[in-house]
Amino acid sequence: MQETKIQEQRLEQLPVFYMEQIVRQYRYMATQALKSHQAGLSVDQWVVLKQISENNGSSQVEIGNSTVKDAPTTTRIIDQLVNKHLVSKQLDPQDRRRYMVFVTEKGRQLIERLIPVVQEYRQVPVQGFSASEQKLFISLLQRMLKNLG
Amino acid sequence: MQETKIQEQRLEQLPVFYMEQIVRQYRYMATQALKSHQAGLSVDQWVVLKQISENNGSSQVEIGNSTVKDAPTTTRIIDQLVNKHLVSKQLDPQDRRRYMVFVTEKGRQLIERLIPVVQEYRQVPVQGFSASEQKLFISLLQRMLKNLG
DNA sequence: TCAAAATAGTTGCAAGTGCAAGAAACTAAA
DNA sequence: TTTAGTTTCTTGCACTTGCAACTATTTTGA
């Protein structure tokens, strides 16, 4: 009689196990960096603000798609940015369901100031990675995402 | 006059950007798999339950360390498992600050039943990855985590 | 021996997220 | 035109998580 031994998997062999930790620690580091430079922004607020500035006038759905956030989350983050006077919303006269979202001058200046800060913390996790390693890494991540999608 | 052009980074070049999506989708898939098998457990509850069973009688701090969750989160998850009668807590007579956590018979049976389910969804993200690619991938993730730690 | 520090666990709060439902506006088809 | 369906955005709710503060117990070291 033969026993089929199921190979048990340890957490340490699961990519996702590491990814959760990486994401958490990275967000923590990024949050601290923004705080220490008096950004007055959360990481998500930064990402959305930056994305708006690169697609000035686009709708909330479009912003949500490009940052991979759902509609309610996008709405709330944009509202927070509006409250801080970093962006403004304007009804699209062509389609009165949509808002066109614009970066204000204050928002533009904040982005300018924060870009070097963000550049700096973004390179922390990939320190010591060669360019080809980074490319390989990204391609593995893309394959994994495809497997899940 | 020379202008130093800052190389702007797109979200698509950031490993963490993909990791967030992967973690989210993976958790979603895992949640569905557990639900469809009437596990009655969240993903985190499963991980903690399994970890307890492999370290029967250990303290909450030890469980928390091995699953990389903080003390309050560990407390809450264990309490949820206690409510479902899958584990039991017992004051350590040697150190009355500690609880020793044990898997119940009901818990053990549930684990047995769920192991194949978990095995199956765990391989989804790494479909098409060779063994050496998986090893490489893990090592890159470990390096990244080290950079952040 | 006794006060201070460290450790285990718990609780409350603020913030974020996912999901479902709903309001308003637009589109398409009968 | 009018009805049904779709899209955009908003709101509410349940749930999770991270953080800080707190209790109880044990350990340390003066």
Image (cartoon, coloured by chain):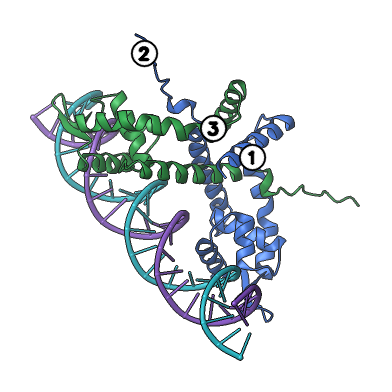
Chain colours: A green, B blue, C cyan, D purple
Q: Is residue A104 visible?
A: no
| Mark 3 residue type | Leu
Letter of the chain that mark 1 sits on in the rendering: B
Residue assigned mark 2: B3
Subunit under mark 3: A
Foreground label between 3 and 2: 2
* Mark pair 3, 2: CA separation: 38 Å
Question: Same subunit under labels 1 and 2?
Answer: yes
Instruction: Name the mark nearer the viewer: 1 or 2.
Output: 2
Where residue C20 sits: x, y (%)? Answer: 35, 50
**Compared with residue C1, is residue B45 higher up or lower down, i.e. above or below?**
above
B133 displayed left or right of B72? right
Q: Nearer the viewer, mark 3 or mark 1?
A: 1
Residue B36 image position (x, y, % from top left):
55, 51
CB under 8 Å between discs 1 and 2: no
Circle 2 chain: B
Residue wearing tag 1: B142
Count neighbours of disc 2 (C-alpha within 10 A) and say few if under 14, some if 14 to 19, many if 20 or more: few
Q: Residue A145 shows which numbered tag?
A: 3
Quarter of the figure with residue B125: top right
Disc 1, SS: helix
| Residue at (42% x, 45% y) in the render | A32
Q: Secondary structure at mark 3?
A: helix
What amino acid type should be assigned to the residue bearing mark 1? Gln
Displayed quadrant of residue B123 = top right
Residues beneath discs 3 and 1 located on the same chain: no
The residue located at (69%, 32%) in the rendering is B136
Q: Would residue B79 appear left or right of A70 to someone viewing this image? A: right
The secondary element bearing badge 2 is classed as loop
* Dot 1 or dot 2, earlier in sequence: 2
